[in-house]
Image: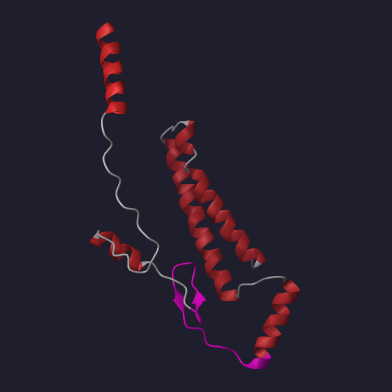
């Protein structure tokens, strides 16, 4: 026991005495950053982003919209203001479909966890899928 305590104290003392290795220089926030990992560079570049003048597709990408006529736009704006919604019918349908698919996946996962007699903590893995499916479903219903 004494040997363990002495070695622990010796290790703690050398941590204070030994010189610390120099810290790497912090990265600056600029556009000239080049990712040193080619795999991660490809992954980051593959992430779709929203560009101006395009509509979002289930947060997975964007597409070029076909603008309706001015009278149709005014009619759509008034309907959206009356219903207090800010997404169109096509996006609502996509969110409803995604919510239903995620709900089925969550249901299958819960059946597997019940059949496997999983403990409480692994069953908590159901919550993200449940909350996301309910959020997508509610978003489709309310239009927000």
Image: magenta residue range: 52-71
Q: Is residue 55 magenta?
A: yes
Which residue is rendered at x = 29% and y = 60% of the image?
40
Question: Which x, y percent locates residue 50?
Answer: 47, 73
Question: Which x, y percent locates residue 48?
Answer: 41, 70
Left or right, residue 28 beside residue 10: right
* Residue 36 lies in quadrant: bottom left
Which residue is rendered at x = 54% and y = 65% of the image?
95
Compared to residue 57, the image places residue 25 above or below, namely above
* Residue 2 lies in quadrant: top left
Residue 64 visible in the picture: yes
Residue 1 visible in the picture: no
Question: Which x, y percent locates residue 65?
Answer: 51, 84
* Foreground residue among 122 and 118: 122
Left or right, residue 8 beside residue 80: left
Question: Which x, y percent locates residue 144?
Answer: 64, 66
Report the residue that reaches farthest toward the top. Answer: 2
Q: Is residue 141 magenta?
A: no
* Foreground residue among 1 and 140: 1
Magenta stretch: dominant secondary structure: loop
Which residue is rendered at x = 69% and y = 81% of the image?
77
Q: How is the image coloured?
A: secondary structure
Compared to residue 78, the image places residue 71 above or below, namely below
On-image quarter of the N terminus: top left
Left or right, residue 102 beside residue 31: right
Compared to residue 74, the image places residue 132 above or below, namely above
> How many numbered circles are shown?
0
């Amino acid at each position: 026991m004494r040997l363990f305590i002495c070695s622990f104290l010796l290790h703690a003392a050398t941590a204070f005495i030994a010189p610390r290795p120099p810290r790497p220089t912090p990265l600056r926030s600029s556009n000239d950053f080049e990712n040193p990992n080619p795999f991660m560079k490809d992954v980051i570049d593959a992430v779709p982003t929203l560009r101006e003048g395009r509509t979002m597709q289930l947060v997975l990408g964007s597409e070029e919209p076909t603008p309706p006529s001015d009278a149709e736009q005014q009619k759509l704006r008034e309907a959206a203001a009356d219903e207090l919604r800010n997404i169109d019918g096509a996006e609502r349908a996509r969110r409803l479909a995604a919510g239903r698919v995620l709900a089925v996946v969550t249901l299958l996962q819960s059946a597997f966890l019940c059949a496997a007699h999983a403990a409480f903590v692994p069953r908590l893995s159901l919550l993200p899928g449940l909350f996301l499916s309910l959020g997508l479903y509610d978003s489709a219903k309310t239009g927000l």
